[in-house]
Amino acid sequence: MSTGIEPGDRVGCTYAGKELEGFYITERDGKAVIKLDSGYNLGIDAKILTKLRTQAPRPHSAKKIEQDESLPQLSIVSTGGTIASKIDYRTGAVTSQFEADDILRAIPGLAKIGHFSAQVPATILSENMTPAIWRKLASTVCDEIKKGSRGVIVTHGTDTMAYSAAALSFMIETPVPIVFVGSQRSADRPSSDNVMNGLCSAAAAVSDLGEVSVVMHATTNDDYCAIHRGTRVRKMHTSRRDAFTTIGSDILGTVDYPSLDVKLSCSAARRKEEGTEPVLNDKLEEKVGILYFYPGMSPEVVEAFKGYRGLVVMGTGLGHTASGCIPALRSLVKDGTSVVMTSQCLNGRVCDRVYDTGRDLLNAGIIEGGDMLPEAAMVKLMWVLGNESDPDRVAELMRTNLRGELGRCTPNGL
Amino acid sequence: MSTGIEPGDRVGCTYAGKELEGFYITERDGKAVIKLDSGYNLGIDAKILTKLRTQAPRPHSAKKIEQDESLPQLSIVSTGGTIASKIDYRTGAVTSQFEADDILRAIPGLAKIGHFSAQVPATILSENMTPAIWRKLASTVCDEIKKGSRGVIVTHGTDTMAYSAAALSFMIETPVPIVFVGSQRSADRPSSDNVMNGLCSAAAAVSDLGEVSVVMHATTNDDYCAIHRGTRVRKMHTSRRDAFTTIGSDILGTVDYPSLDVKLSCSAARRKEEGTEPVLNDKLEEKVGILYFYPGMSPEVVEAFKGYRGLVVMGTGLGHTASGCIPALRSLVKDGTSVVMTSQCLNGRVCDRVYDTGRDLLNAGIIEGGDMLPEAAMVKLMWVLGNESDPDRVAELMRTNLRGELGRCTPNGL
């Protein structure tokens, strides 16, 4: 910077007729990037910035957090994401720069709930999640449970958290709670949800729950978090704190805030007897995709998945594509691709027996995905194909409820 | 049939321990298909069927419906779908076999609301909708308005109704209501929504509304229909009658049932002065697709859209893909594809300025889709590219609200 402004300095300017203040982050693509007090970043001409004051160096406490070893042993497994982010004035605000102890420092209340160990198998923005990182994550989580952890908190970016929670649901038979948590607003924003979500996730991690879940704000108030089943949850808003929604079943429970009282529904799996080992099955077939059908789709788009072992179609309504796409789907099935039909409606159940196109799709060999969410169906298909090569057996497993991903299947109209 | 059972005959059997009754439809793939009284079809071994009675020939009233010419002139434009379906005992239950007069016969109350003319530009299951049929539909609708229609009801299958409503929103500047209506349950089912939806759509068609809308059950009760803006509506359930939801704005209004009182919100466009001509612009670029991003997506899937003029990406969260997909997207943009980012969250607004991957996507030339629904964004992109070849101008139009498809755009964080 030629203007003498350094990362972290307080700056001000007039923009679109408004007086703005914030912290200088960096210069990028010819624009100064400042973090406004709203938490958003603004790219702006550096020349209009005025330095208000130099940022005092932040006290970087290297002091070890005191932990109470009489409390339950819990694990924090961090993969990055907003909840693990600090303001990084060098590279832009919300990258994931997390050292495991930081979360205990950022959310001191955690140390009253458990005695934590921490692992960092990945530090990514969650849109960069891959099946390979799921394997690493699953194995890290299992190791923590084997070492005696009574509950595991996985901090994760919200973008793909539902995919990852579904992946671990299939990959681990867990005796203890595995709780995914994230935050929709970074810690430096007044409306950040990191503290409440973090404390609620810890409360869920010491609860009687015994399955993979996502714990996030249930409302726009700071009143309680919902506990969602890992195979039934979806991010349904780009920015709201209550973005995560359970679809197709009831939530597993709630964590009241600030009391942290946990209520579990009768459908939530319960914690197994102490000492029960987790079972890890981390085989995933990576050649699996999602195809979103739309009017006018050329069959060539279907053909892009030639050679794939699995494909989840997000069809219209009860699970349809245009008749013109069915030959290409049939050809994929003939070549050995397992094709599973889900619906872009997201809610409700696929049923390909009502209308002609549906019956033609069944005749082409597609597998009805029932009421599985497309994302859960994709991850399940990866896992089933990782473990099974016979197409009939694959189809049977895709139609079988394994981890609460599939509701009770009512035979057609009965 | 060797068993002496004919289409339309009443049959019975014992299946899965239950006594079932229904009408014999046809034989298909070695199975007898019967329509159960629930309205669903069941494929079943013909040998277990018992004929209960021969179907009496239905009285096929060829009598012309009496219409009151003093009532407002309205049009029914049918494209097929469940609302237009009759039970067809020869080909399977729910195909679309519609003659225009049939809807007046099926819903006698319509004749008290308007004086109808009818057109049938297509008879398809709506998953087979194409841009070419949109052109035909738009021109039919415009012709009806030019001939003096004070409101047009478009009967349409529910699968792609939202896409088609968005398409006509862009293709026609309308002085009168253009109301899409469908039904989630066919007319022969006790829970059919065809009568209430049909009457409510007619009430909307004679109302003061002046834009393209979708009118469907708002709740699971038979109490009122919602009037949705054509560019803001989405089918959000595979089978429920209240499947259609407005996302990202308020509904345009309601039609109470059975009073048929219409209430319009202040944001709904109003009917133009009588005699105002509709403006048809039916140019659509067909080489436009939708790409649904998922973890582990290979850049090759992006490359399947090489040569496309437009691509709508359904990214994660605020509008992201994996970093590994960005070079392939950049390459599409360089080759002349206009790439618009939307979110698979469906709710909320895309903002690619907060996180690194978002900024990288912007640098690669993607266009932020704001809070446009992916389906509306795709149809808009078809229409914009049909009318405009300069990529900068295309980007500008995609970022401009044309038909209520895009909410007020708040500059980043201000």
Image: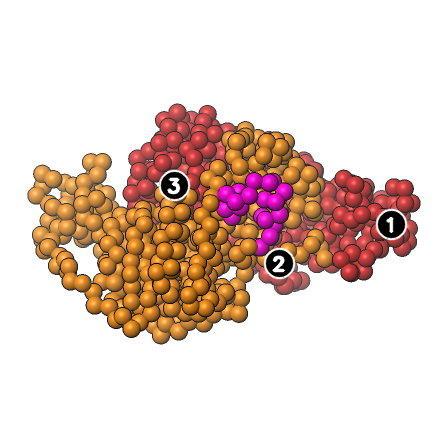
Chain colours: A red, B orange
Q: Is residue A252 left or right of residue B319?
A: left
Q: Residue at x 39, y 73 (%)?
A: B261
To which quarter of the image does residue A128 belong?
top right
Q: Position of residue B348 (x, y in %)?
A: 59, 54
Magenta: main secondary structure:
helix
Q: Nearer the viewer, residue B124 or A111?
A: B124
Q: Do the dots labelled 3 and 2 sit on one chain?
A: no
Does dot 2 land on a helix, a strand or a loop? loop
In reply to whether residue B392 is colored magenta, the answer given is yes
* Residue A355 x, y percent position in the rendering: 30, 46
Residue pictured at 18% horizontal, 52% vertical: B22
Task: Report the magenta residues as a range.
Answer: B380-401
The amino acid at mark 2 is: Arg
For disc 3, the marked residue is A321
Question: Which quadrant would residue A178 be assigned to in this image?
Answer: top right
The residue wearing badge 1 is A9
Q: Secondary structure at mark 1?
A: loop
